[in-house]
Amino acid sequence: MQVFERPELLPAEPNIDPDVTSKLRWDFDRFATDGLPDELEAFILEEYGIDVSSEYAGYEIRNPWGKASGQLSMTARQVQEDVDAGLGFVVLKTVIAEDGAGEQTMAAWAIKESRMLVESIAGQNGETGWTVRWKGRGWWQSFDDYLRLIRDASDIAKSSDTLIVPSCKYHLPRPDETEWNRSEYEFTTRAMLEAWHSTDERPMPLEKDFSPTLAGSDLATVQTQILEWLEIVPSLIRYLGNVPVDNAQNKHAERAPVRIGLKVFNAMFDDEFQLRMLEKVHQTDAEPCDFYIHGNRLFDPDRDFDGHKGIAYGGPDLSDRNLRVMHEFARRRQNAGGLPWCATGNILSGRTAVEYALLGASSFQLHTGFQLPSEEYSMKVGNKTQKTLHKLYFHPTDGFIAWCLHVAGQKSLDHPIRFRDIVG
């Protein structure tokens, strides 16, 4: 099995002015008891000379931090908390596509979480981290309820700079199937667009979730079929399921106002096949996606939880794989450029985020990081989103500010430092 070397992108500690380290430590301690500044991005720019704005799905966002799709982003109240905390974007819980009659070919993924467990996990490199285990997969309530969530979440965020992002799992043919259920693509996409445009006239950002559990299902047993999914899905979404998949450039087809992001899962094959997946996202005979997300959780068919065998997991092994795959992908492409991408996977520190940024990620979405045990957060006021941002930004040796300053010094970047100049 082909496994690449994990790159050494950063040293053990940031090389920055000791006075800046002292200031970070002071801010870290005082914000732990007093709470974060109201205008956080402006504070970071004024005090540390860093512009943390970035982009996701082609839209400018106030900062690169987002909440990944899951049970932490399935109510208006949760979205309100994240908007108030100042996240750059929020990806809503993944809805399972359906046709006009309410039928779902992927109904097996519409299972309610019955139990969730946050636990420590040790990586093969000896590093310890955290992972979440749960039963259940996508949105289990009605599709009308999901459309209401899109409207409510967009309404909550419209006066802020937080971007709301729906997420959907559409039909994927099994190895023994030859037809795509295009009616699911058309009906679901049209309905979501109508809900989105009730509050926002812009094209709708949309994550197409393949789900890490696909890595352990019968659906992912044939590599050629996985590559076909990555090639064809963007066209079916963009042209509302009506255009022939071998003629995705048909200029007479109705084109949906949507910005499509493929959430590339970690398949249960070697690193070389993961690279083939990424190449297919970039070099397709059909119309490509607009951006992609890489790479959500690993899958272990032998792990069990609550009577269910075969579960997805995260932790240090996840970020190790993502970083080594993306490093090799960047090395092979060199100056060929590529689609914008959003990193996910064991982002529990600003340091890890900057590692992903050096490989081209312009934004980061977290899930486990927002639900650690309370004692893992140094900040004792506010909600877990605020506590997470406190840790990500201001930790004196592991935080985003410290490592952005380190990279800026290595690259001799002018002040004020733009995070987007660090990306890639």
Image (tube, rainbow, N blue to C red):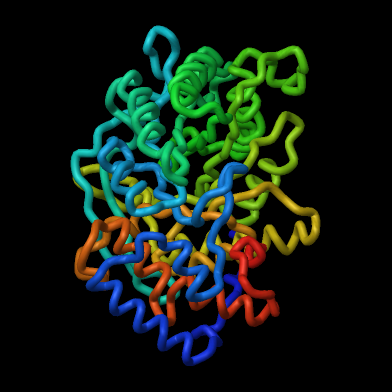
Q: Quadrant of the C terminus?
A: bottom right
Q: Residue furthest bottom?
A: 18
Is 401 situated above or below 313? below
Q: Nearer the viewer, residue 101 or 381?
A: 381
Residue 280 lies, in percent from the top left, at 69, 41
Taking the spot 33% from the left edge, 62% from the top edge, the residue there is 388
Q: Quadrant of residue 315?
A: bottom left
Could you tell whether 250 is left or right of 367 in the image? right
Taking the spot 55% from the left edge, 51% from the top edge, the residue there is 342
Residue 48 lies, in percent from the top left, at 51, 75
Could you tell whether 146 is left or right of 292 in the image? left
| Residue 216 visible in the shown view | no
Taking the spot 29% from the left edge, 79% from the top edge, the residue there is 29
Q: Residue furthest right?
A: 335
Q: Nearer the viewer, residue 51 or 376?
A: 51
Q: Nearer the viewer, residue 339 or 20?
A: 20
